[in-house]
Amino acid sequence: MKIISRRTQKRLKDAFYTVASHFISYFQEQTYTSTGYKPKEITFHSLEPLAIVGRNRKLYIYEVNYSSEMGFHKSKLAIKVFDAMDKVLQEASGNQILRYVLEGNPEVKTPQLLYYSKDFQLLIYEGLFAEEFSNSKINESEKYYLAGRALASVHNKELKNLDLQRYYMFVENIFNKLFDSNLIPSKTLEELRDKIVSEIEEKMFYSYGGSRSFGDYHVGNIMFEQQTEKVRNLGLKSDKFQIFLIDPEFIEDCIENTCVDRFEDIGTFFAKILLEDFIKTAGKPKKVLNDLRDFLKGYNSIFDKAETAVADDEKRLAHVKAARLPLLYARLEQAVIKPPFSSAGYLTKDRKDEIVVSESYMNTLNTFVEGCRKEGIYALNEHGLNVDWYYDIMSKPKAFSRKVTVIVPDSDMKINDGYKLTDRIDAHPFHWLSAWMHIKAGSFEAVIDLEHEMKVSQVDGRFRQDVNYSIFYPEEVKIYTSIDGINYKLVATKKQRVGEEYKDSHYSSLVIKTDFLPIKARYVKFRAEGKSKTPDWCKHPEIEPSMQIDEVSVL
């Protein structure tokens, strides 16, 4: 046990005996629970230190010895001390919010706040006969499952937009410190900052994933208590354990557009775990992926239970289905990183040994897309994709996240951002940086390695044009396929007029589609040929022509 100093012990004992009369009813209820009788008189005898817990060693666990007309009794208290009065009020408010959110939830609770004192700068909670997450004897898979269920109980079940201002301020604060450090050239920092702000605007503006936030959700804020036979059989996966969430110091309720991305709490929970796993495995973390899978199973199970409960109420059922859309999206994205042809993965093989999307993945994808369309959701903030585009590029095995090699013919120019062609990040026409691959030349070739032989019959490329800055659509697109990556066959050609009719236009984007008879291929070569010289009718004919392309989809 960590030693509590005599000075601290005296301070806490003095505080307890001064304020204990304000929550005498708590000890009366404790006595009633253990004896069946509610005493009228309570006399305190001693306050014995048991432990100091918490990352900042600010939570003191005490055993309280007291007596009543029924005899002698023991109970537990947790006293949390602060270094400022406003923090006391902040956590007291957080406890009130959390108790309201979890009201009526038999599985997840937060300790009862018995008293808070601005004078002594402390909070007094009921004592728990519970184990911390890290010390619990529950198996690892079960713990992460229950942690996911607990977080889903905290987040609201409505589709909400995000408060982008907090993210702008976060970026601004970081870069102000970097500017002051003089470690990185100012111009580089300005470009990087503008790019990040652009990414926030582009990918988060249309988000419906907002929710209240626990704010500091980590393993140290979760405890499990062994249940008695009286409170079991609640229909839970593990009805032997009560989940407690503690330290709601940074919880934020979701009011109008002040919501936080619900995945932020999940990211906070796994940040340290991922780092430790990353170091232990030399950059190839595995355990954390399994932990995340169990966590998301638990998170989703809350929605499964909710759908079952309101199955006969069409209006409420629709509400629950809409609320779980962000989780369906997470499941779809997680399946993509699984090993090919694994049971939980994205791809499988049919009876003809053809590579196809797994049935379970397609069922989830269809449910997700139908739900988005029903709710009028057009954009997916996590990757900036619109729903229709997402369905198109995920419903068949194709080029997602595949290796791309880009060259500029007759040039030694190096292109290092070919990954942007298959990263599924749908760039916005307004932002010429961010997700667009910029080619400072009139033509280029991109070779996509599909990693497996598969039948392809369509290749699409999305281009951006801004004639004011000599960025043009290609005038011709050619598609080649190959089995070995050496011998290529021309399978499609598509021409695109780029004339003076665009003189007064600003920026725009265009998906150039090519289709052809199905053919087996492992490698797909996408060749775009454009202007070799900027026309005189352009605003800046002196600028060399260039091209910008975002996604290449292979169907």
Image: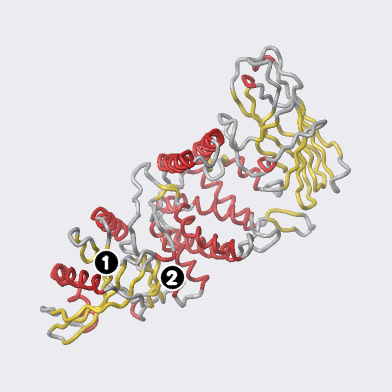
Q: Residue placed farthest to the front in the image? A: 182
Image quarter hosting the C terminus: top right
- Residue highlighted by disc 2: 133
Horizontal placement of 433 versus 164: left or right?
right
User: On screen, 531 above or below 110?
Assistant: above
The residue most toward the right is 487
Q: Residue at x 63, y 35 (%)?
A: 436
Q: Give the residue drawn at x 27%, y 77%.
A: 49
From the top left corner, tell me how far across and down residue 230 is, in percent.
Answer: 33, 79
Depth check: give the residue in front, 259 or 124: 124
**Distance CA(mark 1)–CA(mark 2):** 19 Å
Look at label 1 and name its amino acid. Answer: Gln
Rendering quarter of residue 215: bottom left
Residue 5 vs residue 270: left or right? left
Question: Does residue 331 sit above or below 81 in this rendering?
Answer: above
Residue furthest out toward the bottom: 71
Mark 1 or 2: in front is: 2
* Amino acid found under the numbered disc labelled 2: Phe
Does the rendering let one see residue 32? Answer: no
Task: Report which quarter residue 461 is drawn in.
Answer: top right
Camera-side residue: 174 or 23?
174
In the picture of the structure, the residue carrying the numbered disc 1 is 112
Q: Residues within 10 Å of mark 2 (few under 14, many from 20)?
A: many
| Residue 38, x across and y down, in percent | 16, 79
> x and y percent of residue 334 in the render?
59, 56
Tally of numbered tags = 2
